[in-house]
Image: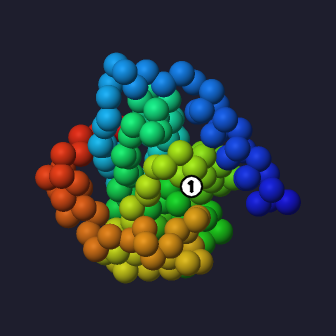
Amino acid sequence: MKNRAIALLALLFTLVGFAMPAAAGDYGKQKVVYHINYDDPQRQAGALRNIQNHVNAVGAANLDLRVVLHGNGLTLLLDPDAVGNTKLKRGNANETMQAKISGLKQQGVKFKICANTLRGKHVDLENDLYDASQEDVVPSGVAELAHLQQQGFAYIRP
C-alpha cells in the first residue's frame, strides 16, 4: 500500500512537471548540479521544488541535472526508520519526499551520493536510503562537484 501511494504521488508530480510548457527556446540546453549538504527538511523540500521548477522551465530533454548529496544532505534519501542505525540525526525520506524524488528521477534527474559520507555516517546504501544503488555512489561529494563544474555544469546551492 505504501509503495502504491508513493508511485501515485510520483506520477502526479511527474505529470505536473510534464504539463508545464517548456521554454527550451529561451534557455537552450543546460548542465546543472544542485548541491545539498544540509538536513533541514523544509530547505530540502524547497530544493526539490527549485529542481522541479528548473525542469519545467528548461524541459527535461534539454537538461542534464545532477543532485550531489554529502554530509547531512544524505538525510534527503534516508528512511526515517533507519536513523538509529546511522550517525545522522534525522531521515527525511517520508512518503511525500519519496514521491518528489521519484518524479524527478522519472524526468532524468540523477542523485549522486558521497561514498565518504556513507562510510563516515554508517549509512547502508541498500537498506537505509530510498531508491539508491551503487551506480549512484561517487567517491567524494565535493570532488564530484568540482569535477562537474570542470565539465561545464552550473553550480546551484539552494
How far from the left and from the top, in percent, is residue 4?
80, 56
User: Total number of numbered labels?
Assistant: 1
Q: In the rendered view, would you say 86 is above or below 5?
A: below
Quadrant location of the N terminus in the rendered image: bottom right
Residue at 43% across / 21% down in the picture?
23
Give the residue at x 32% y 35%: 29
For numbered disc 1, what is the local secondary structure? Answer: loop
| Vertical position of residue 76 compared to residue 138: above or below | above
Q: Position of residue 14 (x, y in %)?
A: 63, 40
**Which quarter of the rendering shows the C terminus?**
top left
Q: Is residue 109 visible?
A: yes
Q: Is residue 57 left or right of residue 84?
A: left
Which image quadrant is residue 2 in?
A: bottom right
Residue 83 visible in the snapshot: no
Question: Coloring scheme of the render?
Answer: rainbow
The residue depicted at 31 percent of the width and 47 percent of the height is 33
Q: In the image, is 43 to the left or to the right of 84? A: left
Mark 1 = which residue? 92
Q: Dot 1, how many residues are within 10 Å of its Cα: few (below 14), some (14-19), or many (20+)?
A: many
* Nearest the eye: 100 or 116: 100
Residue 93 x %, y %: 59, 57
- The answer to whether residue 149 is left or right of residue 78 is left
Q: Position of residue 113 (x, y in %)?
A: 39, 65
In the rendered structure, the answer to whether residue 53 lies left or right of residue 144 reads: right
Q: Nearer the viewer, residue 121 or 2?
A: 2
In the image, is residue 52 above or below residue 143? Answer: above
Amino acid identity at mark 1: Asn
93 vs 1, nearest the viewer: 1
Residue at far left of view: 150
Q: Residue at x 32, y 70 (%)?
A: 138
